[in-house]
């Protein structure tokens, strides 16, 4: 027997050829999988030498930071360019990043046929709400779902239905803080959970109505039974309060919203969202959420049948949605489907996005008010002047007064809170065809990320010649919005939103005083924008009218951000005195 036979086989021409072919195939596959840059757009050359692209650099950044958008924005600074590309879409097309307000405005408002959903938000939310209108392209599903929501942002619904619920919820928050202020005896305490849960109470009431005790009222009952709590020795240290867990549905929505963080930081957000459906704790939360929404729909259907569609009997957002579904079904000659996946996903999506965006902005607002005592004092004085009857009667303004009266300085503060807080750090779209952006050809199917704090908003804009702009931009002369002065663009100044009114000799709020894009724009801009502004007006009016927010020290005053569905502060503490 030839003991060297196997070795001779290894050295045979056939084996060598097959082995060589395998190595060549593996090499060619590796080369094919390497990131392929779009010509002309700046990028990190090192990232093109690995199939993982920029992912290792992103993961390294996330080891020390909870904010991915700042890392992305750093590429514009690194290459001194308003347009860059990066490779975090494993085995896919590069992402194109736009760091210029004017170009963002052009894409969102004027070039809607060239840029559409799905986008980054679609990818991270798809696992939770695949039929929510926000995650859809501008197609028949999107249009059908938006019809269900048609009446929810009208002045009539907002002022007569939503405003009283919002006011009641945030009045409860003021009572909760009164209990904490007395027990804390001048010590700071965290309000982050308080604000999130009250916002959840508020948006739940807007869509389903009030039904007994709320999360916030349960916290009040728990604290009112206490005579004292453990106090730290230092007056600058925070008091820690116990917490009563809310109803299963509320906890479910809060925890499901938190789960989006993993999708937002994953190279495969849709896959991550799909996998998370099978995590036992999230499955339990999803089941609790579905049961609660189904129960609320059943109650609303019973009301609809009892009231025979009387529009005067509408008490919440779901009532409106069911009437819209019935009208659509009657017109189409079919039976209404009140329990459709679209109906349930719209409700869950609105609850999730509605509570998260408004609560996050309110948290940033409280931090800015404590850090800028002059702004806080001026805002309180402006509120007193705007609601003289409430001031003379020694009470807070009611829901009708706040909804129907404009306080110009409050509006200016809200815009500056949004500009600096950056609740929504990025907008995004996907190209529907080959397009030209700032002189570069970008292929169809490329995702475009646009920074909410981009050039012209929180830092000076990059100089961009008009010949690189689109025909739509040139036809609109760049839009009517004015520019911020580059020397003061980073300064927190609500007054930047006020202009002189020659007719009255007073300063009035001007939304076009300078760039801002926290709610997107165009047909696919934030649907709940008007509700969000109303909620912020009511919450801030009550908060500033009722309490003084004293300056904080050390870690309690930190402005460190974290990103999930929104960009929120890691901590939010207050040190209160009665106003």
Image (cartoon, rainbow, N blue to C red):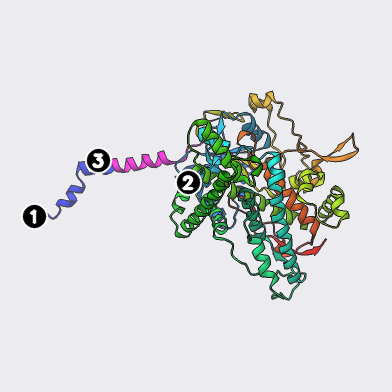
Q: Nearer the viewer, residue 345 or 544?
A: 345
Q: Nearer the viewer, residue 30 or 475?
A: 475
- In the image, what residue occupies the spot 45% across and 57% down? 279
From the image, tell me which residue sits under label 1: 1
Helix, strand or loop at mark 2: helix
Question: What label sits on residue 17 in the rendered view?
Answer: 3
Q: Is residue 64 above or below residue 407?
A: below
Q: Is residue 139 in sight in this rendering?
A: no
Determine the main secondary structure of the stretch shown in magenta: helix
Q: Is residue 146 magenta?
A: no
Residue 223 location in percent, x, y? 68, 69
Q: CA distance from mark 1 to mark 2?
A: 59 Å
* Residue 18 occupies quadrant: top left
Q: Is residue 331 above or below residue 289?
A: above
Q: Nearer the viewer, mark 3 or mark 2?
A: 2
Lower position in the chain sequence, tag 3 or tag 2: 3
Q: Is residue 169 in sight in this rendering?
A: yes
Residue 257 location in percent, x, y? 56, 53
Helix, strand or loop at mark 1: loop
Do the numbered discs 1 and 2 sit on residues whose CB atoms are within 8 Å? no
Q: Is residue 11 above or below residue 240?
A: above
- Magenta residues, start to end: 21-37
Q: Mark 1, residues whose alpha carbon is within 10 Å: few (<14), some, or many (≥20)?
A: few
Q: CA distance from mark 3 to mark 1?
A: 27 Å
Residue 253 as seen in the image, left or right of residue 570? left
Residue 235 as seen in the image, left or right of residue 48? right
Lower position in the chain sequence, tag 1 or tag 2: 1
Q: CA distance from mark 3 to mark 2?
A: 41 Å
From the image, tell me which residue sits under label 2: 270
């Amino acid at each position: 027997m030839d003991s060297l036979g196997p070795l001779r086989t290894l050295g045979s021409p056939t084996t060598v050829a097959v082995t060589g072919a395998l190595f060549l195939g593996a090499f060619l596959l590796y080369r094919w999988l390497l990131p392929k840059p779009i010509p002309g757009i700046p990028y990190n050359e090192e990232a093109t030498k690995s199939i993982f692209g920029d992912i290792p650099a992103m993961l390294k950044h996330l080891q020390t930071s909870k904010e991915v958008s700042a890392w992305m924005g750093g590429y514009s600074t690194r290459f001194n360019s308003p347009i860059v590309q990066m490779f975090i879409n494993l085995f896919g097309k590069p992402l194109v990043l736009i760091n210029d307000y004017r170009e963002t405005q052009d894409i969102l408002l004027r070039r809607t046929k060239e840029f559409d959903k799905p986008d980054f938000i679609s990818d991270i939310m798809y696992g939770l709400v695949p039929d929510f209108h926000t995650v859809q392209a501008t197609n028949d599903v999107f249009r059908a779902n938006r019809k269900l929501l048609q009446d929810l942002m009208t002045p009539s619904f907002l002022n007569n239905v939503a405003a009283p619920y919002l006011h009641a919820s945030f009045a409860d928050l003021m009572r909760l803080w009164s209990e904490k202020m007395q027990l804390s005896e001048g010590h700071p305490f965290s309000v982050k959970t308080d604000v999130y849960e009250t916002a959840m109470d508020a948006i739940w009431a807007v869509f389903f109505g009030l039904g007994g005790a709320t999360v916030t009222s349960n916290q009040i009952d728990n604290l009112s039974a206490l005579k004292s709590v453990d106090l730290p020795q230092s007056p600058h240290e925070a008091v820690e309060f116990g917490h009563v867990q809310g109803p299963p549905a509320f906890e479910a929505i809060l925890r499901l919203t938190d789960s989006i963080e993993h999708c937002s930081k994953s190279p495969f957000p849709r896959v991550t969202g799909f996998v998370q459906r099978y995590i036992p704790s999230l499955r339990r939360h999803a089941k609790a959420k579905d049961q609660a929404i189904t129960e609320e729909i059943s109650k609303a259907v019973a009301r609809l049948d009892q009231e025979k569609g009387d529009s005067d009997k509408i008490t919440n957002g779901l009532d409106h949605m069911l009437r819209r579904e019935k009208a659509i079904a009657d017109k189409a000659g079919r039976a209404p489907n009140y329990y459709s996946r679209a109906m349930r996903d719209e409700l869950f999506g609105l609850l999730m996005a509605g509570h998260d965006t408004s609560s996050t902005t309110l948290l940033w607002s409280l931090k800015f008010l404590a850090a800028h005592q002059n702004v806080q004092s001026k805002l309180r004085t402006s509120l007193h002047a705007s609601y003289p009857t409430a001031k003379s009667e020694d009470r807070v303004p009611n829901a009708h007064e706040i909804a129907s009266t404009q306080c110009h300085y409050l509006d200016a503060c809200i815009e500056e809170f949004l500009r600096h807080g950056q609740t929504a750090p990025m907008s995004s779209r996907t190209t529907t065809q080959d397009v030209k952006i700032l002189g570069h050809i970008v292929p169809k199917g490329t995702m475009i990320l646009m920074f909410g704090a981009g050039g012209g908003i929180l830092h000076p804009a990059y100089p961009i010649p008009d010949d690189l702009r689109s025909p739509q931009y040139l036809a609109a002369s760049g839009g009517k919005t004015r520019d911020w002065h580059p020397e003061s663009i980073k300064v927190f100044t609500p007054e930047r939103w006020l202009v002189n009114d020659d007719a009255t000799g007073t300063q009035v709020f001007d939304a076009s005083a300078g760039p801002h894009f926290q709610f997107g724009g165009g047909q696919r801009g934030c649907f709940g924008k008007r509700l969000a502004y109303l909620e912020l007006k009511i919450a801030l009016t009550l908060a500033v009218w009722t309490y003084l927010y004293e300056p904080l020290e050390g870690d309690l005053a930190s402005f460190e951000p974290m990103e999930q569905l929104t960009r929120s502060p890691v901590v939010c503490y207050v040190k209160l005195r009665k106003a």
